[in-house]
Amino acid sequence: MSGLSLPIDGSGTANAANVLAPNASPMTLDGTNTWIVGRGETVAVVDPGPDDETHLSTVATRLADRTVEVVLLTHGHEDHSGGARRFAEMVDAPVRALDRTHVLGEEGLADGDGLTVGGVEIRVIGTPGHSFDSLCFWLPEDGALLTGDTILGRGTTVIAPDGDLADYLRSLDKLRTMAELAEAESLLPGHGPILPDPIGKLDEYITHRRQRLDQIRQAIRDGAKDAREIVEMVYAEVPRELWPAAEMSVAAQLNYLKSL
Ligand SMILES: [Zn+2]
């Protein structure tokens, strides 16, 4: 189910609809998912995506007869935030994000914040790790969690240079607990298709992280001297074009192991 490479443009839940940005790549999968949250006159737009005029116009046109009250960012990476400023101008809305450098208007965004847009409740959950400023957005009415790059629709995410593995592991545990308590029904990722089994997916991510750490410890015991050598041993099955990302991820894991 979640392993299939399905285009998801137009898919969603009762209060969230996807518009897929045309920036497909090995790192961004099918492209960035821009999410329109709200089914009434007033909506929020989560992650306008890269600075791509065609995509931003597509989203704006689709919302021409509605009001965009606010633009929210799951985090500041360019493929999610690059078009935020331009899009905000197009629709005359503020941008809210954890990282103040992306905020347009008065209000930032932080763990524990809650907002209601067009009658739809959005709860903000701080999930640092993939990046220092990663947030997830919980839509209680839909039982759906917008995950940005914290959980992807396919494969696993990387710890970016501005992220931290210890934080990421804590964030996964936090989401796992929350998904269980709140009986989450779906994950709406920043890239790739909707995931229908939040707890299963989070368990998979947590297990995967532990296994990778074990493999890296083993690679070091087997004589790997640096991140590159570890990648060659541990990520042998991963396509070569993803090795630079894997090296980044290994560097984050080495930092984490050193800090223990
Ligand atoms: Zn990212």
Image (cartoon, rainbow, N blue to C red):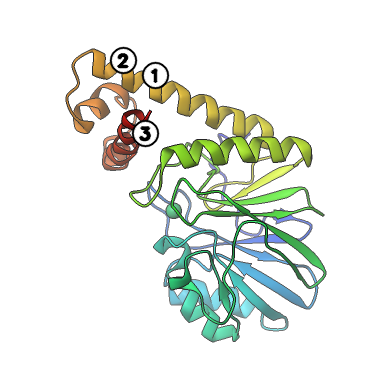
* Residue 71 visible to an observer of this rendering: yes
Label 2's element? helix
- What residue did someone put label 1 on? 214
Label 1's element? helix
Dot 1 and dot 3 residues touching (CB under 8 Å): no
Q: In which quarter of the image is residue 46?
A: bottom right
Q: Nearer the viewer, residue 62 or 214?
A: 214
Mark 2 packing: few (<14 Cα in 10 Å), some, or many (20+)?
Answer: some
Label 3's element? helix
Q: Would residue 219 be found to the left or right of residue 183 on screen?
A: left
Mark positioned earlier in the residue sequence (1 or 3):
1
C-alpha gap between disc 1 and disc 2: 6 Å
Residue at the image position 52 percent from the left and 64 percent from the top: 98
C-alpha gap between disc 3 and disc 2: 15 Å
- What residue did someone put label 2 on? 218
The amino acid type of the residue labelled 1 equals Asp
